[in-house]
Image (tube, rainbow, N blue to C red):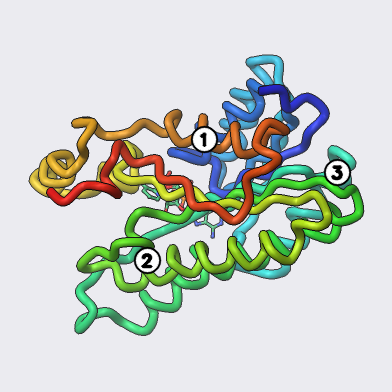
């Protein structure tokens, strides 16, 4: 996969899956805008430069319209274009439904779903003008099958799937594809916070028998971002070791 001359924005790429995606796209030749809410973005941009790639950190909270405008404007002024958007930033605030606060509902829906709307809207007019674009958004297996304690997170991730299919239909005629990835259980800070017994229980539900790595997700993103994936749009690709087809 060759992404030379392409410019990518990867949201929430200071660590975890986003970091792996930023590094993988840079390895394929893309210039990468490393976005995160915190300083970690600078470290990943430095890693990319150390590998002779092009990386630019832009700190922004992608749930805020003004920050997203600045993110897209700075990406364009730095690299001249945006070809690939990876909507990866996400959080969880788990609680059983009956105890879930309004704040935890709103926060997760805003960071995980509204950000996808804001960032996609922000880049689309540039992609439409250049008649080429890739929008890849991080959903979750939880958005497909649900999960106790994650009503807010599951709703946001299911929303990303409906959003992706709609965007795919709206912009297909302009050479832009929109796809979602539904990771299963991937080894990152988000999942390292889970109690050990919960991690072991989740592991038993994975037919391939092991927890995925951020790089496993990054490989799928690199493919969907490439020219080779030009005929794939409106899809949800599970990267889950078979969890999505498991009855365990
Ligand atoms: P992670 O390790 O928690 O990383 C998420 C990154 O997003 C963090 O660097 C975080 O920054 C950043 N972020 C949070 N809010 C942001 C905001 N408003 N604006 C910009 N950046 C923000 O999570 P991960 O496990 O890599 O997950 C990445 C994506 O994959 C998420 O959308 C997640 O829902 C999805 N996913 C993960 C799994 C899994 O098993 N890990 C499974 C399915 C789906 P701070 O740390 O500074 O807050």
Q: Could you tell me which residue is drawn at 36 percent across and 66 percent down? A: 154
Q: Could you tell me which residue is drawn at 75 percent across and 51 percent down? A: 176
The circle drawn on residue 81 is: 3
The reply to whether residue 37 is visible in this rendering is no
Residue at the extreme left: 197
Q: Disc 3 or 2, which lies upstream in sequence? A: 3
Above or below, 222 relative to 1 = below
Q: Secondary structure at mark 3?
A: loop
Mark in front: 1 vs 2: 1
Q: Disc 1 or 2, which lies upstream in sequence? A: 2
The circle drawn on residue 220 is: 1
- Disc 2 packing (10 Å; few <14; some 14–19; many ≥20): many
Q: Position of residue 57 (x, y in %)?
A: 67, 39
Q: Could you tell me which residue is drawn at 75 percent across and 31 percent down? A: 31
Q: Position of residue 144 (x, y in %)?
A: 36, 61
Mark 2 lies on residue: 153
Q: Position of residue 163 (x, y in %)?
A: 58, 67
Q: Nearer the viewer, residue 137 or 207?
A: 207
Splitting the image into 4 quarters, where does residue 30 fall?
top right
Q: Secondary structure at mark 1?
A: helix
Cβ at disc 2 under 8 Å from ligand 1:
yes
Q: Name the quarter where the N terminus is drawn.
A: top right
Whole-number angstrom distance, CA of label 1 to CA of label 3: 23 Å
Splitting the image into 4 quarters, where does residue 25 fall?
top right
Q: Secondary structure at mark 2?
A: helix
Q: Nearer the viewer, residue 106 or 183?
A: 183
């Amino acid at each position: 996969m060759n992404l030379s001359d392409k410019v990518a924005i990867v949201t929430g790429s200071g660590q975890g899956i986003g970091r792996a995606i930023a590094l993988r796209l840079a390895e394929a030749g893309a210039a990468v805008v490393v976005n995160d809410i915190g300083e970690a973005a600078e470290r990943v941009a430095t890693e990319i430069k150390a590998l002779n790639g092009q990386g630019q950190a832009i700190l922004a909270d992608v749930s805020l319209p003004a920050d997203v405008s600045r993110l897209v404007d700075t990406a364009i002024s730095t690299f001249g274009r945006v070809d690939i958007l990876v909507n990866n930033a996400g959080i969880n605030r788990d609680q059983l439904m009956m105890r879930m606060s309004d704040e935890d509902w709103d926060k997760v829906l805003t960071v995980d779903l509204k950000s996808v709307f804001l960032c996609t809207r922000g880049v689309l007019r540039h992609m439409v003008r250049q008649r080429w674009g890739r929008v890849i958004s991080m959903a979750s297996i939880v958005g497909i099958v649900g999960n106790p304690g994650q009503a807010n997170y599951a709703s946001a991730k299911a929303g990303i799937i409906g959003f992706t299919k709609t965007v795919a239909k709206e912009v297909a005629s302009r050479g832009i594809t929109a796809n979602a990835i539904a990771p299963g259980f991937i080894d990152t800070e988000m999942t390292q916070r889970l109690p050990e017994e919960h991690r072991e229980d989740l592991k038993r539900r994975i037919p391939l028998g092991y927890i995925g790595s951020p790089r496993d997700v990054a490989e799928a993103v690199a493919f969907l971002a490439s020219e080779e994936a030009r005929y794939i749009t409106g899809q949800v690709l599970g990267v889950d070791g078979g969890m999505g087809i498991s009855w365990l």
